């Protein structure tokens, strides 16, 4: 087979779909986007974002529960089973 200039696809298969995080009807998309943005920034070394996120999750039970749900799905999707 010839090369097409595209990277080879992984041959991993997902045997069962990961559960989707549930959003309550009153969760605002901008609120969720802000939560995810802070997590991405914190993961990549933004100390201010990490402190803000930590404080937010410590004081907002809904944000904590939703973030835990998102983190669980991400863990399941990692090819190494979540080992970082």
Image (cartoon, rainbow, N blue to C red):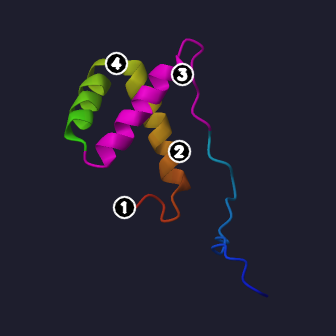
Pointer 1: residues within 10 angstroms few (<14), some, or many (20+)? few
Q: Quadrant of residue 36?
A: top left
Residue 32 point in image, percent of width and height: 48, 26
Residue 76 point in image, percent of width and height: 53, 52
Q: Mark 2 to mark 3: distance in Å? A: 19 Å
Q: Is residue 56 left or right of residue 3?
A: left
Say which of 73 and 43 sits in front. 43
Q: Nearer the viewer, mark 1 or mark 3?
A: 3
Mark 2 sits on what residue? 73
Q: Mark 1 to mark 2: distance in Å? A: 15 Å
- Secondary structure under tag 1 reads loop
Task: Please tell me which of labels 1 and 3 falls first in the chain.
Answer: 3
- Secondary structure under tag 3 reads helix
Magenta stretch: give its range: 20-45
Q: Quadrant of residue 82?
A: bottom left
Q: Quadrant of residue 50?
A: top left
Task: Please tell me which of labels 2 and 3 falls first in the chain.
Answer: 3
Q: Mark 1 to mark 4: distance in Å? A: 27 Å
On residue 84, the disc is: 1
- Secondary structure under tag 4 reads loop
Task: Please tell me which of labels 1 and 4 falls first in the chain.
Answer: 4
Mark 4 sits on what residue? 60
């Amino acid at each position: 087979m010839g090369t097409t200039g595209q990277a080879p696809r992984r041959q991993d298969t997902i045997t069962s779909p990961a559960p989707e995080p549930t959003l309550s009807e009153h969760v605002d998309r901008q609120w969720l986007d802000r939560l995810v943005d802070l997590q991405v920034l914190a993961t990549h070394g933004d100390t201010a974002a990490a402190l803000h996120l930590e404080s937010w999750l410590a004081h907002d039970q809904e944000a904590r529960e939703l973030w835990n749900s998102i983190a669980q799905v991400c863990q399941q999707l990692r090819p190494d089973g979540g080992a970082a």
